[in-house]
Image (cartoon, rainbow, N blue to C red):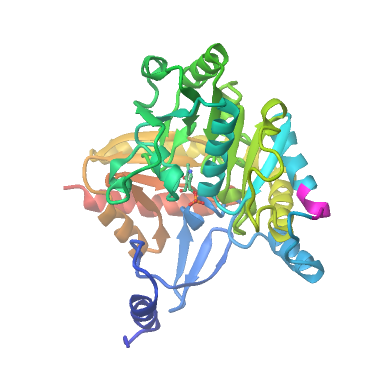
Amino acid sequence: MGNTQTEAVIHAYDRYVMNTYVRSPVVITKAKGSRVWDVEGREYLDLFPGWGVSGVGYNHPWVLQALRGQSRRIIHVSNNYYQPLQWRAAKKLVDASFDGKVFFTNSGAEAVETAVKLARRWGQGRYEIIAMERSFHGRTLAALSATGQAKHQQGFEPLVPGFVHVPFNDLEAVRRAITPKTCAILVEPIQGEGGVRVASDEFLRGLRELCDTHKLLLLMDEIQTGMGRTGRWFAYQHSGAQPDVLLLAKTLGGGFPIGAVIATRAIADTLTPGTHATTYGGNPMGCACILAVCEAVEAQQLLERVAMLSPSIFQRLAAIRQQVPMIQDIRGRGFMVGIELSQDGRPIVEACRAKGLLINCTQERILRLLPAMTITRAQLDRALSILEQVLQQAEP
Ligand SMILES: Cc1ncc(COP(=O)(O)O)c(C=O)c1O
């Protein structure tokens, strides 16, 4: 056993937990808003809370209240009965997006699986889905096959057939990839794991047109971008290009594992009783959390907050870039920020952590910030000051 509590926990993980994650040596025991505490009592400011899950902040009081209240009534209802919360959560999501119906899942990958099945069944023999290079859609087999990154797929072949990958933001390439077998196009409005790459509004509108012309479904994966992160409920709303199917998870449950697929009314009934199911999907605890998250987004005016605070993040980063030549690019939208470096970003993440700031690095060189929409201006300022200091010290 190790000398510190942290070492002891790491040692126990080595013995009992499958080693599938690259983990930082921090044992988290408590969190609130954008702050996290470890087992040694150290406090961190988290600009990447819960890998995008804690969009309304860790332990949002209304989410806690929803969990407490619902747990006193019933924590699970099987889907062959009705319950009062599932339709209310579905209605809330439909009201925030477009007229349609919702299928609830337990995770993002399961939402992707659902969308793939929906598209295939709707396609009636057409089964090909055009997805994007560098995309990320999850780790289950169809989601992995949809993912446009070979590094995640190696060793798991044969993949699920029927996925074609084209360069992101290249409408001509999408057009060329359409065949008589194509049933859908799958896109993230901002690629998250792929390096915070923003789809242009023209690209998304072009995809919409292609789908209309060729009778294809437009599937948008907003598992990372959805529920307010970009300053609108959903990132597609910046472009005016509405999807036929919208995929959600992460922020949706405020920390409770739940995902959702919203399909337009015209196609939602493609899935009929017996064609698709999941035991826990739409669990009342999860639905109560969705309602609490939506309530927080609305009553705390979090969309407006993101829209108001986001420009100051990008301005500050642009100023830091003047002093730090290793910054090659700054991109993103709202509270989804990528900082591309000319060198490995992982030592920067570690140096930030040593100074009490948690951030992420994706694709080796792209620092990623997904702050909670409830973060205070002072917390943001402090976080960016730490980042600035670390970047300046790391400059070769
Ligand atoms: C865009 C996107 N799609 C799908 C997923 C998979 O979600 P989950 O890990 O909940 O299965 C993720 C997770 O990072 C994601 O960012």
Q: Residue at x 39, y 36 (%)?
A: 161
Front residue of this view, candidates 380 and 339: 339
Front residue of this view, candidates 382 and 344: 344
Q: Is residue 82 magenta?
A: yes
Q: Looking at the picture, does residue 169 appear above or below residue 145?
A: above
Quarter of the figure with residue 133: top left
Looking at the rendering, the stretch of residues picked out in magenta corresponds to: 81-86
Quarter of the figure with residue 350: bottom left
Total numbered labels: 0
Looking at the figure, which quarter contains the N terminus?
A: bottom left
Name the side, left or right, on which 324 lies relative to 131: left
Residue 223 in view, yes or no: no
Q: Looking at the picture, does residue 262 appear above or below residue 48?
A: above
Q: Is residue 237 magenta?
A: no
Quarter of the figure with residue 96: top right
Q: Looking at the picture, does residue 285 appear above or below residue 370?
A: below
Of all residues, the one furthest to the left in this rendering is 396
Q: Residue at x 79, y 52 (%)?
A: 85
Name the side, left or right, on which 198 lies relative to 249: left
Q: x%, y% of residue 122?
A: 60, 28
Q: Residue at x 54, y 48 (%)?
A: 110
Q: x%, y% of residue 13?
A: 38, 76
Front residue of this view, candidates 58 and 84: 84
Q: x%, y% of residue 306?
A: 58, 40
Front residue of this view, candidates 195 and 223: 223
Name the side, left or right, on which 283 lies relative to 26: right
Q: x%, y% of residue 266?
A: 70, 25
Residue 284 in view, yes or no: yes
